[in-house]
Structures are given as structure tokens and as C-alpha cells.
Amino acid sequence: MRKIHIKKISEIESEKLIKFYQNTFKYEKSVLEDYNWRYRTKFNEHEPLVLIIDSQICGHAGLIPVKIKINNKQENAIWFTDFYINPEYRSKGYGRLLTEEWMKICPIQITFCNDRSLKVFKKMNWSFNNKITRKIEFNNYFKLLPIFRKSNLSNLDITKTEDLQHIELNDATLSKIIDINNYHSSSKALSIVRDDSWFKWRLMECPYKNKINIFKFKEFFFITHIKFKNNFKVLNIIYSSTSITHKVKRVFLEFSRKNNIDYIAYLSAEKKLSNTFFPWHRKINFAYYSKDTSISNKLEEGFNDAHLIDSDVDYL
């Protein structure tokens, strides 16, 4: 008879937990080991769950607590992240068991997920929409050929351009960005609450803070994360205080050419945006669940101000 337990991560020895993460998730080392940051455990009492079978961690259901504003009222919600079941125990009901327990943590649950995960959520009465698109604009199409994928993985120096002003990430800059974000979100009936504590957690305490750069174009701010992925040098625009217009895109593509960046990536809720050569677009599944019909109906509208900085999309 197997011994099955579902526990909070705070009930698991740190070394054992980190070893499980190292063997399971493909994050860079700093993000992988700083799981208290990744799951924002200091925000409230909500925390991820692990499935223990015969004293071994065999499953995991992560979360990131967040507040969302619905009709001028703030509600607690959780992002569903880092779901995993050991292959040996898949298709045996353990995944559903863990998810059902996870869904008891908070009454409002949201996630960006792939098609495979979406099938599971739909079976558990989650709803979804595809109103957000992850857009990729290639600067160097030759890098699509494996023979040309030889990026200098140690070079993260920045060559500036006339149009983009490189801004230091500090409290003063953050304060300006927060003020602009609050101004834009104040008129929205549905939005993610990115207040002072949220931005400080997401940026100032971020384990890869040294790879985050803030730029200013005219009066607008852009938070970026330059990283390497599959031998591509990538610039993620993880947050912007304005829409990514054609002009903004041209400015960042020019910056990318000067800095040997292969492509830029960002989220967009706009249907018609890109006319660049060979644009890569991918609709993102936004799934959500709430027993409150009024909240569920509002979530159906989707977050038209979602960014890569939200949930775990940026560092996956």
C-alpha cells in the first residue's frame, strides 16, 4: 500500500526541494534555487504543493500569488505554474488529485498554459481564451539555420542607440514606472495589480536582476530581459508603459542589430500589428477558474495589459 501525502513546500527540507527542482525544471541556476522568489512566498500564506509518494517527491503544483482588480475591487488570485508529475505516476489520477488540492488554496485561479495542460484544465471546468499573442520579430534570420547558431554566450554588453535611453534600475526609476502603470490601470475594469510591492519583488529582488535593462523612448519606459535561449540571443520586452507600435518595434530592431540580438519577443493583445518579414506569432492560452460567475465572466474578457513579466512566461 503506497503512502501518499500532499504537502506545502515549506514542509519539505530545502535541500531535498532544490534537488527535485534541479532534476525537474530547466531554469537557470539562480531562478531554480531561489524558489522563495519564484513563488513569491513572502506575499501571503499561499504556497506551492508537492505530491509525496513513499517518501519521494513525485509531483509538484507551483503558484505565484497576485492581486487582480475587477471593477475597482482587488481580489486575491494565484497563477498556476510548474506543474509536474513523475512519468511513472502519470495517467493514474495523481495529477488530478494534486490539482484538486491546489484549487482549494485560493478562489481565483489563472494561468498561461500550453495545449496539453489546457486539456486537463478543461476537464476540471476551467475556461479559457486566446486573446493574447506572443510575438517574435527576428532580426537575424540566418540564425534559424543550425550552422549559424554560435552566439557568444558571455557577451551581454550593450551598445546604445540614439533613440533609446538606457535607464538605471533604481527606486527613482521604479517609482516613475509605478505611477504610469497605476494611471493606465485605473481606467481598466480588469487588470493585474502591479503596485509598489509587486514591482520591488519582480525586479529589485529578482535573481537575474543583472540581466534586466530599462530603456526610455520618448516618455515611455520599457523593461527588458536580454538572455540566451537555444543559442539565440533574445531581447524580451517584459513590460512596457505603452503599446508596442510599429515605431517602437523599429527602434528595438535597430537596437537589436547593433547588439547582435537575434530576435525580440513581447506579448500583445492587438490583433493587427506586425508587418515585418517572417513574423512569428503564437496565441497563448489563458485559462482561468472561479466559482463566482461574475468574476469568471469578467476574466473571459482577458487581460489586455498582460506582459511577459507576469506569471512565469519570461524566464521559462
Image (tube, helix red, strand yellow):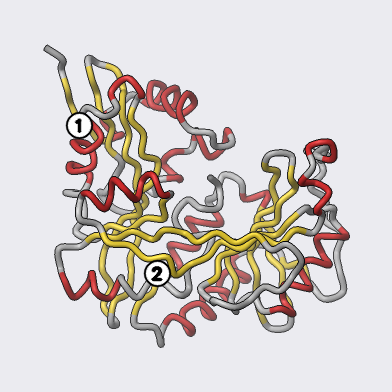
In percent of the image, x 78 and y 53: which residue is there? 262
Secondary structure beneath label 2 = strand
Q: Residues within 10 Å of mark 2 (few under 14, many from 20)?
A: many
Looking at the rendering, which quadrant does residue 198 occupy?
A: bottom left
Q: Is residue 87 left or right of residue 227?
A: left
> For residue 93, which numbered disc appears in the image?
1
Q: Is residue 272 above or below residue 26?
A: below
Q: Position of residue 191 (x, y in %)?
A: 39, 74
Secondary structure beneath label 1 = loop
290, 192: nearer the viewer: 290
Q: CA distance from mark 2 to mark 1?
A: 33 Å
Q: Position of residue 4 (x, y in %)?
A: 17, 22
User: Quick one: quadrant of the N terminus?
Assistant: top left
As shown in the figure, which amino acid type bears the numbered disc 1? Gly
Q: Is residue 171 left or right of residue 112?
A: right
Q: Position of residue 13 (x, y in %)?
A: 33, 24
Q: Residues within 10 Å of mark 1 (few under 14, many from 20)?
A: few
Front tag of 2 and 1: 1
As shown in the figure, which amino acid type bears the numbered disc 2? Ile
Q: Position of residue 264 (x, y in %)?
A: 70, 59
Closer to the chain start, of discs 2 and 1, is: 1
In percent of the image, x 16 and y 49: which residue is there? 104
Looking at the rendering, which quadrant does residue 18 occupy?
A: top left
> For residue 192, which numbered disc appears in the image?
2
Give the number of marks. 2
> For residue 67, which numbered disc appears in the image?
none
Q: Is residue 189 above or below residue 310?
A: below
152, 75: nearer the viewer: 152
Looking at the rendering, which quadrant does residue 28 occupy?
A: top right
Mark 2 touching mark 1, by CB under 8 A? no
